[in-house]
Amino acid sequence: MRLIITCTFLTLLLGYGLLVPGCGAPRKIKTTLASNEVLVQAGAAEDAGETQKAYELWTRYVELRPHEAKGEYRLGRIENQLGKYADASNHLRIAHDLKPGNIIYIEELASALANGGQHSELISMLNASASEGPDGSGYLRLARYAAQAGMMDEAREALLGAIAVNGRTSPTSHLAMADFARDIGDVDNEVLSLRHVLWFDPANAVILERIRSLGVIPGPSLAIDPR
């Protein structure tokens, strides 16, 4: 009895890395080859500063490879540059959903939401992703965008969150709190935060001069242990 094997069956062998002469190439392979070519062209256009061309090519790439994090991000980034903030937000949300914890994706999404005036969604997204990133950086990101949006209570709470995470091991969140206090005219909190910064680097000339400018004379007991 002769065994008859169809091309449809044989193409299943491609999953094992085999090619079958005489059978038409599967659509998946054709799509992959086409998308790889568009990927190269889109990257080249972007590198050359041809933003509109890059936008068209990244749009094509996403059509060929929908819901791929890299493509969604690159298209969203280009749309952000072109002022297409709503479209950018949509694609960057997908990228973030596919790759949560990718700080580059979060930052670009935050930028698109802020540029598009979507402040409520921006703060909601940053709150939800506050734990993403090392050493309290998510809380600092939330504080930065909240302050830019004029949401000072939310910014202060975010800074306190950052201090709770890394305030005992790093001066970063204390310095951010000092800058925030300066921006809102809270001199007492600015001085206190700078004194915490000094605990990590008592001889920091920039911080010492800043404290002097606030009317405080540096002394041996100026630095305060944030623990």
Image (cartoon, rainbow, N blue to C red):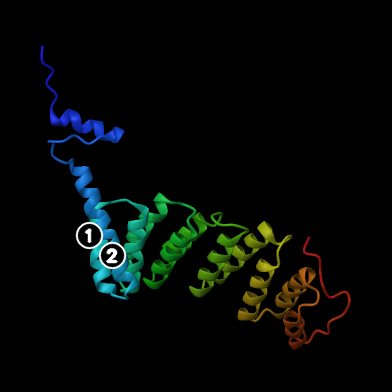
Q: Quadrant of the C terminus?
A: bottom right
32 lies left or right of 2: right
Query: x and y percent of residue 53 in the render?
Result: 24, 71
Q: Residue at x 23, y 31 (%)?
A: 12
Image point (77%, 64%), residue name? 226
Mark 2 is surrounded, within 10 Å at the Cα level, by few (under 14), some (14 to 19) or many (20 or more) other residues, namely many
Q: Which residue is mark 2?
A: 42
Local secondary structure at mark 1: helix
Q: In the image, residue 205 lies at what x, y percent?
A: 76, 82
Location of residue 13 with respect to 181 vertically, above or below: above
CA gap between label 1 and label 2 equals 9 Å
Q: Nearer the viewer, residue 81 or 16?
A: 16
- Labelled pair 1, 2 in contact (Cβ < 8 Å): yes
Label 1 sits on residue = 60
Image quarter of residue 223: bottom right
Instruction: Inspect this view and state whether residue 160 appears.
Output: yes
